[in-house]
Image: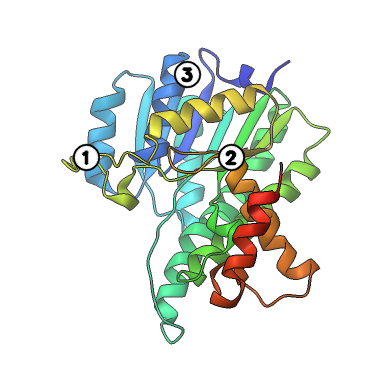
């Protein structure tokens, strides 16, 4: 049975960060398949708009701070009372910001939402999902920044790198179960983080994908049984992404300094190497 069979009428989806962007697009995808949808998000205005967009008595929204463990317990209780169990869990909530090494609040905000928001979600729902012993799926939203590690956002990159590791271990631990696990790695997507939030009048950049494109790509890759869902966009192909990842890993293997793709003394070598690679 394909993992995509979880997208079925009367199954229940729980999506964090589901009131806008990729999360909302996935919620809409779930509704197209007749699923019941629980949307958790911190932004009450976005939740109200999402409720209008999704409609239906089979949709419920929950104002939730995913960085607070006690709110996860409350969310679980509410979702179970409303819908019963969860068949499709998408841990998608995340924030982006910049800060200096002296800014502990910056690191705490990013880590508490992007990392512990995933950890707490898994702590709360994985045992319940496993107890159901029926086909289910878990999607965790990562980032290419957690793999290629570009300079400028150390806390965000570290949070998404940790999320990747968690997803990999979860996939291994649940390998013999009826639950499939997937790491969604979006490309450049026009979401709230890039100025495309609810109510925005900004035009989508030509190079970016829409959230709906990411949701459709995710669905197809889940159907193909893929764990790593590495999304391209209109500027960067999947092949180019893979070359960048291979070069990044080469920093370790070849004992180069870290982040050589952005160092002037390695720039030409990196470009020549990637031009020659076939993946």
Check disc 3 and report the residue beneath it.
Answer: 35
- Residue at the farthest right position: 176
- From the viewer's side, name the closer residue of 114 and 57: 114
Circle nearer the N terminus (3, 1): 3
Between tags 1 and 2, which lies in front? Answer: 2
Check disc 2 and report the residue beneath it.
Answer: 238
Q: CA distance from mark 3 to mark 2?
A: 30 Å
For the residues labelled 3 and 2, say whether their Cβ atoms are less than 8 Å apart: no
* Residue 216 position (above or below residue 40): above
Occupied quadrant, residue 128: top right
Circle nearer the N terminus (3, 2): 3
Q: CA distance from mark 1 to mark 2?
A: 24 Å
Circle nearer the N terminus (1, 2): 1
The mark found on residue 165 in the picture is none
Residue 192 on image: x %, y %: 31, 48
Check disc 1 and report the residue beneath it.
Answer: 203
- From the viewer's side, name the closer residue of 12 and 181: 181
The quadrant the C terminus occupies is top right
Q: Residues within 10 Å of mark 3 (few under 14, many from 20)?
A: many
Q: Residues within 10 Å of mark 2 (few under 14, many from 20)?
A: some
Residue 79 on image: x %, y %: 47, 34
* Residue 217 position (above or below residue 172): above
């Amino acid at each position: 049975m394909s993992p995509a069979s979880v997208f079925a009428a009367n199954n229940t989806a729980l999506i964090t960060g589901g009131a806008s962007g990729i999360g909302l697009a996935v919620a809409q995808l779930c509704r197209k398949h007749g699923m019941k949808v629980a949307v958790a998000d911190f932004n009450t205005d976005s939740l109200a708009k999402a409720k209008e967009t999704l409609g239906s008595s089979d949709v419920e929204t929950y104002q939730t701070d995913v960085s607070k463990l006690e709110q996860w317990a409350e969310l679980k209780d509410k979702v179970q009372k409303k819908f019963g169990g969860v068949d499709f869990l998408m841990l998608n909530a995340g924030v982006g910001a910049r800060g200096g090494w002296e800014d502990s609040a910056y690191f705490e905000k990013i880590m508490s939402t992007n990392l512990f928001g995933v950890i707490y979600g898994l702590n709360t729902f994985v045992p319940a999902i496993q107890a159901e012993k029926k086909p289910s799926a878990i999607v965790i939203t990562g980032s290419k920044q957690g793999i290629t590690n570009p300079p400028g956002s150390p806390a965000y990159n570290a949070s998404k790198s940790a999320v990747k590791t968690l997803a990999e271990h979860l996939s291994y631990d649940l390998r013999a179960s009826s639950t499939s696990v997937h790491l969604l790695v979006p490309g450049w997507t026009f979401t709230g983080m890039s100025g495309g939030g609810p109510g925005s009048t900004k035009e989508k950049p030509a190079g970016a994908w829409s959230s709906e494109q990411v949701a459709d790509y995710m669905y197809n890759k889940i159907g193909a049984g893929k764990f790593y869902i590495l999304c391209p966009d209109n500027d960067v192909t999947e092949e180019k992404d893979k070359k960048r990842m291979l070069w990044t890993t080469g920093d370790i293997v070849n004992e180069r300094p870290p982040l050589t793709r952005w160092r002037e003394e390695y720039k030409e070598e990196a470009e020549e190497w990637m031009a020659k690679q076939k993946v």
